Amino acid sequence: MGLIEAGKKALALASVQKADTIVIASHVDPDGDTLGSSLAWALILKKMGKQVTVYNQGALPYSYTFLPGSECLVDQLPQTCDLLCLLDFSEFDRAGRDLPEWQGYTESLCID
């Protein structure tokens, strides 16, 4: 695990602070790591007053339905957002069929 450079941390924080609508995307065939981090990040952002969508292509595996907030996962993207957060992966194509078309059209933050 590497340390985040101060400048990158400040840029990431500024991106989150200025965004009103945020989409959190997890990778296809999600595991507990990506789902847990996505749902936890969503709870934090909602407490900050952000409108948050947690996206994952396909159905939530039954073994993860116990996770708090799992009922909020969606498999359809909203039309737009101010910030796209990629959690637990770094390539757009790992998010599934819909997300690559957003590449370059919205600000994004990758936390892997």
Image (cartoon, helix red, strand yellow):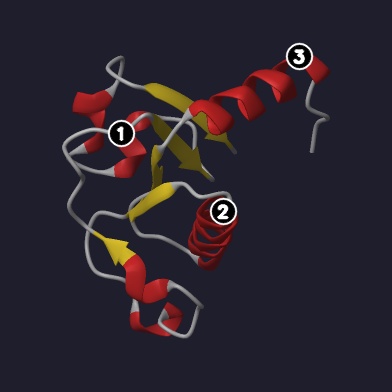
Q: Is residue 7 left or right of residue 16?
A: right
Q: Quadrant of the N terminus?
A: top right
Q: Determine the secondary structure under disc 1.
A: loop
Q: Determine the secondary structure under disc 2.
A: helix
User: What residue sits 48% from the left and 64% below the top?
Assistant: 31
Say which of 8 and 19 sits in front.
Answer: 19
Q: Determine the secondary structure under disc 3.
A: helix
Distance between mark 2 and mark 1 Cα atoms:
16 Å
Distance between mark 1 and mark 3 Cα atoms:
24 Å
Q: Which residue is mark 1?
A: 81
Q: Which residue is mark 2?
A: 41
Q: Is residue 6 left or right of residue 108?
A: right
| Residue 72, position as x, y percentages in the image | 34, 68
Amino acid type at image mark 1: Cys
Distance between mark 3 and mark 2 Cα atoms:
21 Å
Amino acid type at image mark 3: Gly
Q: Earlier in the sequence, mark 3 or mark 2?
A: 3
Where 109 falls versus 38 (above or below)?
A: above
| Label 1 environment density (alpha carbons within 10 Å; few <14, some 14–19, many ≥20) | many
Q: Quadrant of the C terminus?
A: top right
Q: Earlier in the sequence, mark 1 or mark 3?
A: 3
Q: Which residue is mark 3?
A: 7
User: What residue sits 48% from the left and 62% below the top?
Assistant: 35
